[in-house]
Structure formats: C-alpha cells, structure tokens
Amino acid sequence: MPPSKLKAALLASLMLAGSASQTHAADPAPMSPAVPGGISERQALVRANRLLAKMTLEEKVGQISQRFDIASLFPTGTPTPPGMPPLTPLDEPVRKGELGALLFVHDPEVANKYQHLAVELTRLHIPLLLGYDVVFGMRTMFPVPIANAASFDPAGVVANQTVAAREARALGIHWTFAPMIDIARDPRWGRIVEGAGEDPYLGAAMARAQVQGFQGPYIGAPGHIIAGPKHFVGYGAATGGRDYDPAYISDAELHNVYLPPFKAAIDAGAGNIMSAYMDLNDVPASANKTMLTDILRGELGFKGWVVTDASAVHNLVKQGFATNKADAAARSLMAGVDMEMSMAPNAFATLIASVRAGKVPMKRIDEAVRRVLVAKVRMGLFENPYVDVAAAKTVLDDPANLAAAQAAAERSLVLLKNNGAVLPLTPGAQKRVAVIGPLADAAGDTTLSLAFPQDAAKAVTVARGIRERLDGIATVETTPGVQIARLYPSPITMMLGTVKRWSADQANSELQKAVDLANQSDVVVMVLGEKLDMSSEQASRSDLTLPGDQRKLLDAVLAAGKPVVLVLMNGRPLDLTGVHDKVPAILEAWVPGSRGGTAVARALFGDTNPGGKLPMTWPRSVGQIPTYYAHNLSHSPEGQNTRYWDAPATPLYPFGFGLSYTSFTIAPPVLDKPELAPGGKITVSTSVTNTGQRAGDEVVQLYIHQRAGRASRPVRLLQGFQRANLAPGETRTISFTLDEANIRYWNATERGWVIDPGTFDLWLGNSSGADKHTTFVVGGAPRPAR
Ligand code: BGC
C-alpha cells in the first residue's frame, strides 16, 4: 500500500478504534475500558471463552505464535545484516491471522499498522500483543538492573520501571520481557548485569518492585505494560558462567535460591513468564514439565501465560532433545509453554497437524489460547488496539524521565574505597581536571542497550558530566588512552559494524596522549571497565580483569604522580588485582544510563553522597568463583578464610558492602520477644545515626542463621534491609518484622517447606559482615511450612 493510502487507512482505523467493538460481530460483548481496578481475570475469561468458541484450529495456533519483527530493529531500507533472517515486515502472516503477538515493534505508526491488519482484516478482529525487551528503560535508559539492585531501594525501582512502562506504552508496546530475575552467583556470566545478583531475598524484593512498576496497580492500567519475568528457571546457574550452557541445580537450591524471585513476581501479579533456553538437570527449560507445570503453576500458583525465550522451541532439536520441530512444538506445549517466541517462522504451526493427528489434545491448545486472550482483554486491546502517535512524543520528551534516570543512577553508585577521604573533590579546587579511559567519554557505553531504540548519543558521559559540573571553574579534558574490544565480537557489534582497531603506532600515541594529559592536570578521574558489548547476552568472560590494556594505562597515568580517583563502569564484579591497592578511591558506577555522567560528577564533587551497596560478593580473582556470602558452614569453619593456600579465600568486598562520605553507627538489635511462636511474629528494632559531617544514606541490613535443624543452613541469610537518608547527627529508629516466612526453607528430604525449631542468630549491620548480634528462639515442633 502506498504510504498515503496506508496513513489514510490508519487514520480511519484510529477513528474506528473507539467503536471497534461494535463493528466486530464476532465479539458481541465488549468490556468497558479499564474501569478502576481494571478488567478482572474472571470477566476476561468470559470474553475469552466466547471468542475461543468461534475460533478455527488455525486461528488458535496463530494466537499462540509470536514472531520477531526484525525489520523494526533497523531503519527502513537497511540491507539484511549477515547471518540475519530477511528484514521483511510481517504484514502477511499478521493479516492471515497466523500471529497473535510480535516483538520489537517500537514505532507507534508501525504498531498501528500491524494492529490495523489484525483488528480490521482478520476474521475475528483479535488485536496483537506487542512485546519488547524493556528491561531498564525504553528511550530513557536507567542504570542496569545490577545497579538498581545496588540501590537497595525497591521504591526507587518501582519508580524507574513506571517511567520505562510509560515510555513503552506510549510507543504501542503492551508487554515487556522483564524483569530478568535469575539469581546469578558467577560473575563470568554476562547476564549477571540484567539481574539483581546473588541473593534470593534481595532478588525477590527487586522482582516485586519491578513487576509493580511495569504493571502498575492492575493489568491494563493506563501507561503500564504486562511484566514477563524471565528466564524460568535456573538460567543464571550456567555451567562455568558460559551463557546458554546447561545448569544443574538441586531441588533444595532451586527452591531456596532460584525460585524466590519468581514467587515474589507471581505474587505481585506478573501476567507473563518467559521460559529459559538452557537444559536444567538435563531437560531444556522450555520443555520442562516439572518446572513449567508442576512448579510454576502447581507450587507458585502462576495464572498467566508462558512464552518461550526466542526460538527456544526450534532449539529443542539442536539441544538433542526433540527429533524435529513438530516434536519440539508438541512437547514444549505439553510441558506448559503457552506461546512460542520465534525468529524463524513458528514451529508451533506444526501443532495444527499434530492436533489433527490426535497427538496433541485440543484442550491444551484451548488452555494456552485462553490465557493469551485473557491478557489481551485485560490490557483493554479489544477496545483500544491503537496507540496515539501524537501523544507518544509528549511522553518521550517529558523531562521527568531523564530526572528519574539521574536519581536512579545516583542511588545506585557504590563507593568501594576512599582512603584519606580523597573523595569528594572540591569543585574548582583543581583547575585542570583530566578524565581518562576508554569509557570516559563513550556515550554508547554509558548506557547498555539490549535492543536498539534508545538514543545512546544523548547519554551524558562521565567526561561531559564533569565538564558541565565544573563549567566556568575548571577546565576538563578527556582522552581514551586505550581501545578495548572483545576477542570474539558480539552479534550486536557485528550487526552494527565493528569499530576499526587502532594500529600499534596509534595505540602508543594514544597512551602517550593520556600520560601527557595526566601530567598537565591537577587531578585525574580514570573511567575504566567494560564496554556495552562486554556484558549481557552472549557476553560471558573467562577472566575478570580490566579488559585490554586498561591496567597498563592506569599504571602509566599513576606514574605521572597526580592524584587519581577511579570510576568503574561495568556490568559485573571485576578482578581488581593491581588496581584496588594502587588507587585511593574507587566509585562503582555500573552502566549508569542516560544521565550516568551527571550522577557520577555530582557524587565525585560532593553534591550527593554514594549510598549503594554491593548486591554481589566481589571476588578477588576468577579462581574464587563461585563465591557468595550465604554458603553453608563446614566442619572446619575456622579455616574458611584460608581455604586456598595461595590466596585469601575472603572476597575483596563482601555482599552488602558500600562506603559513604559520612559515618554511621547502628545500634544493637532489640527484640520485642525472645521467641518466635508458631504463627507468630518478632519485631526487631534498632536505630541508625549519622555520626559524620555530611548527609548520607545507610542501608541497615538484617541477617539470620539457623544453628541446627533437619538440614544445614547458610551461615547468614539476608532477611531484611532498609535504606535511610540521614542528616548529620540525625538518628532514625528502624524496625523489621520477622515471621515464619523468614525462617522456612525447602527441605530436600521432606520434599517441602519446613520450619525447624531452635536457636537462630540475628545480626544487624551495613554489610553481610554485620556484627550487632543477638539470638532468638523458634518455638514449637519441627513442622511443615506454607
Ligand atoms: C533473550 C531474552 C530476550 C529475547 C528477546 C533472547 O535471546 O534470552 O532475554 O527477551 O531474546 O529479545
């Protein structure tokens, strides 16, 4: 269709949108659009069932098929990049009703085009669900999830994902493949950046907050989208940290470590779940009935629909599990997958023949379709399938979005070292400031992109942030010093075109330039770490040192003898051997997002005070991996720190650690009663005081340990945290409530949740090394728990 005709058709369909339900005889009883509280699942079910009764098998299979709209990822007219399927839009399959959902559409006009084809031109006028990887921002990029976890601030995370949802919804997106809530204890794994780190309690808090932010008060709330927590389940346990490799997880570990964030997300109402790629205990996660049906639905009570990860059904053949794509589709569906996401034409199309051959029951197809239709009804798509193109701009241009991104970046900074209180720097005290490193002025690396539409060029780099902060009071110069790159380029880099590598001569002269700049400066801010393609999917590492020649650069700059502070930008803990001991101050900025440089500059110059804490145990070297604070005791706990004879077994920084420009004291815990009776509660109170000269945030953390029981339990477990902002001299009373949910655990012998009576240790403090100790007793008999 020529563009003018297409526009006219869209306009007509937009005008029809309000009355679409009247025009569609197949759907006689429309719901009233998003009433307060939304359309309930029961109401939606009535409508879904009515529709289902009219559907052909082909239409049903279409509804449970989702395809990549690859064309949406590239500017119109881009030739197909090598190794990619053709960039042909999916108009035809949509018009024929072969697809119920698409991913990657993020242009409101394209969204409306596709909806027009689905709503006006298919027999039953069923709108499409449009999904996208809105993981930590849509246009406005927030700090990466590991950074958000470092904020220990769930309310802030709700706020971030509310902005992300609003931007996405304005572009016509209904559903996000997020949050990524895989627990990860191996920093070699690239996707550790997308999650909340190693701890199930913190992971659950972040999962809950993200679902609330994305979905708002109910599914279908204006300006919100459906959350699709992923990847169910155990993807973070990839062997050797190698992305996609199999995971082997015991039943106890699965329940006690990997499932809690999913439980929290489901309890928070997540509408969708994405199944993972990898083999879990020898069965691919996207065809794993134990996980997708018995546990996800049976134990966790999930009611929404399950989508596979991209092309995971096709992959079942490659994984040596299914004989062909029909076998793969049937077994994945029967295991509990409701919708197939695919890059290639859907394997689920084979379900038509499988049903006809009696190999797959229609009942199971109906169940899957019903779940998808319920989501569409609850999102109000039958009443309002289209997006208001003009309004999108207003939402995306709202300056509040960037302000929120800046606040989020500020909350996620972690001060790892500050010897001699070298930070904060006094603005203007040093007249010549050098900002050196391959990430110092790299806008694209200041935000991490999982997909493409954010405007990386608009990100504020650290160099720019400092320049703006010192405008008129100091000169700020920047140079990269070295160039860093992956040994094996990432698929994204290959698609976008690889950057030309410096020649040996150029590398020498760039390094010299950095040294000269350091020599001419009064202070040097080094910005080192990992580029955007060095973490996330297909970005695992075997070594955690600073990539490339960054250590050489640091040493050369340090030799200039000027004061140096180090800002790290990275998606995972790094091996800081030969770095940590040489610089007096280290600020962990993660991948800080659109306003990252502003946030970093404000912290370096004391406008704000870093208050984030590490959501990961930070190893000294790759040889310590996996290392996490919640390990079990052994028969020789006194030897814990010297388990290796060639290096300390202690981490470089413990989980929960982070410094501040001020100092705090945390008072010993006071319990309202010494015993947690069956069904009872204990209130733990303390106070936290800012004993220094600056305002700042402290995260008060509560850890417990079961001394004895039917299983050995971790030496410490986080079971509460609160972040408090305190003026100098201010004291705040803080209380935590403990109940049976905090002490229950999954017992592999009992194959269920249990509570063991006896003595528990309790510590309060500002890291997993918390030292304000008391005990409490769990009363009653050994019992099952819910
Ligand atoms: C990733 C998912 C992502 C999907 C769609 C997959 O390769 O594993 O996390 O949601 O692609 O982009």
Image (cartoon, grey):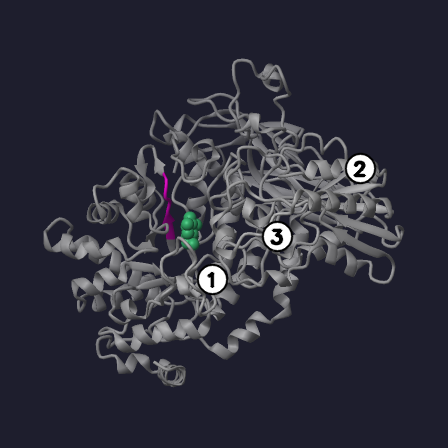
Residue 28 vs residue 704: left or right? left
| Relative to 750, residue 81 above or below | below
The label number, if any, that marks residue 217 in the structure image: 1
The alpha-carbon separation of the residues under discs 1 and 2 comes to: 52 Å
**Would residue 672 be visible to someone looking at this image?**
no
Q: At which x and y percent is residue 192?
A: 52, 42
Q: Which residue is mark 2?
A: 558
Toward which corner of the image does residue 93 lie, by quadrant?
A: bottom left
Which residue lies at the image location 49% right of the left edge and 44% below the top edge? 204
Q: Nearer the viewer, residue 474 or 483?
A: 483
Is tag 1's residue or tag 2's residue first in the polypeptide sequence? 1
- Disc 3 is placed on an element classified as helix
Seen in the image, is 630 located left or right of residue 226? right
What is the C-alpha distance between the residues marked 3 and 2?
Answer: 24 Å
Quarter of the image with the N terminus is bottom left
Screen quadrant of the C terminus: top left
Which residues fall within the magenta stretch? 273-278
Please name whichever residue, 164 or 720, is drawn nearer the observer in this view of the structure: 164
> Is residue 776 placed above or below 639 in the rendered structure?
below
Say which residue appears at 31% left-offset and 63% top-offset.
374
